[in-house]
Amino acid sequence: MTLCKYAAKNIGELIGKVEEESGVAARDASADRIHDLRVSIRRLSETLRVFEDVVPDDAAADVRKDLREAMHLAGTIRNHDIAIDLASKAKVEVGGRFEEERARAVRALGEVLSKWNRAGIFETWRVQLHA
């Protein structure tokens, strides 16, 4: 197997994982689902960085740019989950502000994930990256 074919195979599998996790996270924004989405995005993004020289010009950068917004929002949600969990363990009341900020980030992430599905972004990525 050539390096290009190997990269395409792995990238295709990772796009499938992001697609799967984004669908789950859009329906269930629990801490575990958000964590799984972040892991899948990070793995795809890093794989694209590693194989940037064997994928079509600028395709990897374009896909990583698409991933960045979702990763930022998922990171915001994850940070709130961790803060809420730590506060709970310390028996400290964090107030409704944390929950409200998390809910806003969940809505924004849901909009991004819905946009991805409406636009057929996963298939677009596969075509751009020859995956």
Image: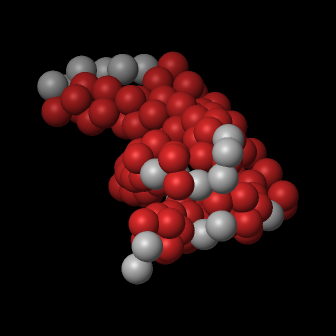
Give how far across and how far down residue 96 sits, in percent: 49, 24
**Would you say residue 61 is visible in this rendering?**
yes
Against 109, is 79 above or below?
above
Q: Residue at the location (45% across, 34% down)?
A: 75
Quadrant in which the N terminus appears: bottom left
Give how far across and how far down residue 15 sits, in percent: 56, 64
**Would you say residue 23 is visible in this rendering?**
no
Q: Residue at the location (84% across, 58% down)?
A: 119
Quadrant in which the C terminus appears: bottom right
Q: Residue at the location (83% across, 60% down)?
A: 118
The quarter of the picture where residue 64 lies is top right
Looking at the picture, tell me which residue is in the foreground, 108 or 8: 8
Looking at the picture, tell me which residue is in the foreground, 4 or 66: 4
Against 47, is 85 above or below?
above
Looking at the picture, tell me which residue is in the foreground, 76 or 40: 40
Residue at the far front: name it: 2
Residue at the far left: name it: 90
Q: Is residue 17 left or right of residue 67?
A: left
Against 81, is 41 above or below?
below
Residue at the far bottom: name it: 1
Give how far across and how far down residue 45 sits, in percent: 48, 46
Q: Is residue 14 left or right of residue 104?
A: left
Residue at the far right: name it: 119
Q: How is the image coloured?
A: secondary structure
Q: Residue at the location (51% across, 46% down)?
A: 52
Looking at the picture, tell me which residue is in the foreground, 110 or 89: 110
